[in-house]
Amino acid sequence: MSSTAQIDAVRRFSRFYTSRIGLLHEGLLGSPLSLAEGRIVYELGTRGSATAAVLSAELGLDPGYLSRLLRGFEERGLIEKTASATDGRQRILSLTASGRAVFEAIDARSAEEIGALLARMAPAEQGRLCAALGTAERLLGGPAPAAPAVLRPPQPGDIGWVVHRHGALYAAEYGWDETFEALVAEIAAGFLRTADPKRERCWVAEREGAILGSVFLVRLSDEVAKLRLLYVEPAARGVGLGRLLVRECLRFAASVGYRRIALWTNDVLVAARAIYRSEGFRLVASEPHHSFGKDLVSETWERDL
């Protein structure tokens, strides 16, 4: 049985951390959303889409309460529902453009605040804190931490796999057609044919033999590099892997003498855009276009090194 002192210690930390990260504020991270609403928006923003049943199970929310929150989101134009392609009884929930904007603002603000919190500590203290949080999560019934992802050069067959996964994932998550896969194949084939290993790289993220994601860095000029084809498997999202891949590009680009790094993306790729912004990239141009079977808005982002 737990002692009174142990119970008081856990409650004291709960009060301290709740106050420190602002959970008692009227709106979550400066938004008009409650904590529960913010968690739903975050799940949809990082997943791309989900059913109400999945959200209820993942967040531990009563289905009736969740239904009321989702109805409010619909009335405010933050989410939309579409019929499942495999089960007509299921409704797939996803964020609208307004919902994505809310998610992006919350995600960027959260990363900024946690980054500021960690910046007060020495690197060793940051490591101790993260290790302690992992221990607390495990002791409270959370999953055991997975083995760390390893970033490695591509091996024969990897690039073909990356092309395949881009085509499959973007079709499933955004409805893009085969012309996107063709573009990825062209970029990948060009890299295989002409990449200069001294100034151009591909990194494959792997854990226990499974590919979790990848990214390319290619030369635009002697001073400018381009980040291309960042992707992370759905099961590996939400744990900082995309950020790790972007940071490896930044580190390598600076080490070989590039002065600036650029990238091209589309406005619907909300999670990736949040990473780019938090890593110091700035949006320098945008333009509507019709590609991959969809009306999109392309964006060019840049960051000085």
Image: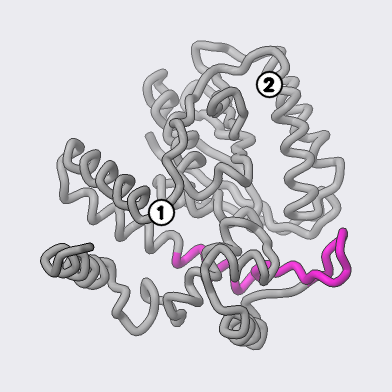
Residue 263 part of the magenta segment: no
Residue name at image x 53 percent, y 38 percent = 262
Q: CA distance from mark 1 to mark 2?
A: 36 Å
- Figure quadrant of residue 196: top right
Left or right: 252 as drawn, with respect to 301: left
Asked whether the viewer can see residue 31, the reply is: yes
Residue name at image x 30 percent, y 60 percent = 113
Is the residue marked by circle 2 packed among few (<14), some (14-19), or many (20+) residues within 10 Å?
A: some
Residue name at image x 65 percent, y 88 percent = 75
Q: Position of residue 179 (x, y in %)?
A: 85, 41
Look at discs 1 and 2 and give the one toward the viewer.
1
Is the residue marked by circle 1 packed among few (<14), some (14-19), or many (20+) residues within 10 Å?
A: few
The residue lying furthest to the left in this view is: 5
Q: Quadrant of the N terminus?
A: bottom left
The label shown at residue 158 is 2
Q: Position of residue 130 (x, y in %)?
A: 28, 45
Left or right: 168 as drawn, with respect to 137: right
The label shown at residue 259 is none
Residue 88 part of the magenta segment: yes
| Helix, strand or loop at mark 2 | helix
Q: Which is more N-terminal, label 2 or label 1?
A: 1
Q: Quadrant of the C terminus?
A: top left
In depth, the one of 182 and 304 nearer the eye is: 182
In depth, the one of 296 and 146 nearer the eye is: 146
List the residue tagged with mark 1: 141
Residue 92 higher or lower than 32, as above or below: above
Q: Position of residue 8 (x, y in %)?
A: 15, 69
| Helix, strand or loop at mark 1 | loop
Question: Which residue type does callout 1 highlight?
Answer: Gly
Question: Which residue type does callout 2 highlight?
Answer: Asp
Q: Which residues are drawn in magenta?
A: 82-106
